[in-house]
Image: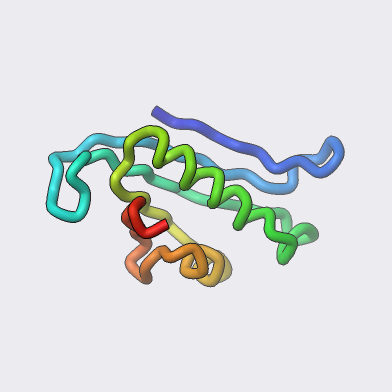
Protein backbone atom coordinates (compact mmCIF):
# COMPACT_ATOMS: atom_id res chain seq x y z
CA UNK A 1 0.00 0.00 0.00
CA UNK A 2 1.07 3.58 -0.60
CA UNK A 3 -0.24 6.77 0.97
CA UNK A 4 0.81 10.29 0.07
CA UNK A 5 0.48 13.62 1.87
CA UNK A 6 0.79 17.20 0.75
CA UNK A 7 1.65 20.29 2.77
CA UNK A 8 -0.30 23.24 1.43
CA UNK A 9 0.24 26.97 2.00
CA UNK A 10 -2.95 28.69 0.93
CA UNK A 11 -3.45 26.99 -2.46
CA UNK A 12 0.17 26.10 -3.22
CA UNK A 13 1.68 22.66 -2.57
CA UNK A 14 4.87 23.32 -0.58
CA UNK A 15 5.77 19.84 0.66
CA UNK A 16 5.17 16.18 -0.12
CA UNK A 17 5.84 12.78 1.38
CA UNK A 18 4.71 9.22 1.01
CA UNK A 19 4.61 5.96 2.93
CA UNK A 20 4.60 2.40 1.61
CA UNK A 21 3.88 -0.44 4.01
CA UNK A 22 5.59 -3.73 3.19
CA UNK A 23 5.55 -7.09 4.91
CA UNK A 24 8.72 -9.04 5.56
CA UNK A 25 9.39 -11.99 7.82
CA UNK A 26 9.42 -10.90 11.48
CA UNK A 27 12.77 -10.47 13.22
CA UNK A 28 13.93 -9.62 16.72
CA UNK A 29 13.87 -5.81 16.33
CA UNK A 30 10.59 -5.92 14.36
CA UNK A 31 8.32 -8.73 15.51
CA UNK A 32 5.44 -7.55 13.29
CA UNK A 33 7.49 -7.82 10.10
CA UNK A 34 5.68 -4.72 8.79
CA UNK A 35 7.97 -1.92 7.64
CA UNK A 36 7.06 1.59 6.59
CA UNK A 37 9.18 2.83 3.67
CA UNK A 38 9.58 6.55 3.07
CA UNK A 39 10.98 7.07 -0.40
CA UNK A 40 11.22 10.83 0.10
CA UNK A 41 10.08 13.93 1.93
CA UNK A 42 10.31 17.18 -0.01
CA UNK A 43 9.78 20.83 0.89
CA UNK A 44 10.03 23.73 -1.55
CA UNK A 45 13.22 25.69 -1.00
CA UNK A 46 11.20 28.84 -0.24
CA UNK A 47 9.40 27.05 2.62
CA UNK A 48 12.28 25.20 4.27
CA UNK A 49 13.26 25.71 7.93
CA UNK A 50 9.60 26.17 8.93
CA UNK A 51 8.93 22.71 10.34
CA UNK A 52 7.04 21.40 7.30
CA UNK A 53 9.21 18.31 6.77
CA UNK A 54 9.19 17.60 10.51
CA UNK A 55 5.39 17.83 10.57
CA UNK A 56 5.10 15.49 7.60
CA UNK A 57 7.53 13.01 9.20
CA UNK A 58 5.65 13.09 12.50
CA UNK A 59 2.40 12.40 10.64
CA UNK A 60 4.01 9.50 8.78
CA UNK A 61 5.27 8.01 12.05
CA UNK A 62 1.73 8.10 13.46
CA UNK A 63 0.36 6.48 10.30
CA UNK A 64 3.05 3.78 10.34
CA UNK A 65 2.26 3.04 13.97
CA UNK A 66 -1.45 2.78 13.16
CA UNK A 67 -0.63 0.41 10.28
CA UNK A 68 1.21 -1.90 12.69
CA UNK A 69 4.69 -1.18 11.37
CA UNK A 70 7.47 -2.23 13.69
CA UNK A 71 10.03 -0.04 11.89
CA UNK A 72 10.23 2.83 9.42
CA UNK A 73 13.01 3.29 6.88
CA UNK A 74 13.74 6.59 5.16
CA UNK A 75 15.97 7.54 2.26
CA UNK A 76 17.25 10.98 3.27
CA UNK A 77 19.31 13.48 1.33
CA UNK A 78 22.15 15.32 3.02
CA UNK A 79 19.71 18.17 3.73
CA UNK A 80 17.11 15.81 5.19
CA UNK A 81 19.50 13.89 7.42
CA UNK A 82 19.41 16.50 10.21
CA UNK A 83 15.62 16.45 10.32
CA UNK A 84 15.35 12.67 10.23
CA UNK A 85 18.08 12.22 12.87
CA UNK A 86 16.32 14.74 15.12
CA UNK A 87 13.33 12.39 15.04
CA UNK A 88 15.49 9.45 16.22
CA UNK A 89 16.22 7.95 12.80
CA UNK A 90 19.61 6.30 12.93
CA UNK A 91 22.32 7.02 10.35
CA UNK A 92 21.36 3.89 8.44
CA UNK A 93 17.89 5.40 7.92
CA UNK A 94 15.78 3.14 10.13
CA UNK A 95 13.77 3.86 13.25
CA UNK A 96 11.99 1.23 15.30
CA UNK A 97 8.48 2.51 16.01
CA UNK A 98 8.86 1.90 19.73
CA UNK A 99 11.61 4.57 19.91
CA UNK A 100 9.21 7.43 19.26
In-front residue for pair 34/19? 34
Q: Is residue 77 visible?
A: no
- Residue lying furthest top: 1
In the picture shown, does residue 36 fall above or below 93? above
Residue occupying image coordinates x 74% and y 61%: 50
In the picture shown, does residue 21 fall above or below 80? above
Colouring convention used in this rendered image of the protein: rainbow
- Where is residue 59? Give x, y as percent: 55, 44
The N terminus is located in which quarter?
top left
In the displayed structure image, the side of residue 10 where residue 27 appears, left or right: left
In-front residue for pair 62/45? 62
In the displayed structure image, the side of residue 99 where residue 18 appears, left or right: right
Count of numbered marks: 0
In the displayed structure image, the side of residue 47 where residue 51 appears, left or right: left
Residue occupying image coordinates x 33% and y 36%: 68
In the picture shown, does residue 25 fall above or below 76? above
Residue 20, image quadrant: top left
- Where is residue 34? Give x, y as percent: 27, 39
- Residue lying furthest right: 10
Residue occupying image coordinates x 38% and y 45%: 37
Q: Is residue 53 visible?
A: yes
In the displayed structure image, the side of residue 83 where residue 36 appears, left or right: left
- Where is residue 78? Give x, y as percent: 52, 71
Residue occupying image coordinates x 36% and y 53%: 73
- Where is residue 29? Give x, y as percent: 19, 55
The C terminus is located in which quarter?
bottom left
Amino acid sequence: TFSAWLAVDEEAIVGTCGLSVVEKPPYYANPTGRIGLLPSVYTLKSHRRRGIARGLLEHIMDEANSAGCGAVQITASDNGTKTSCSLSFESRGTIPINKI
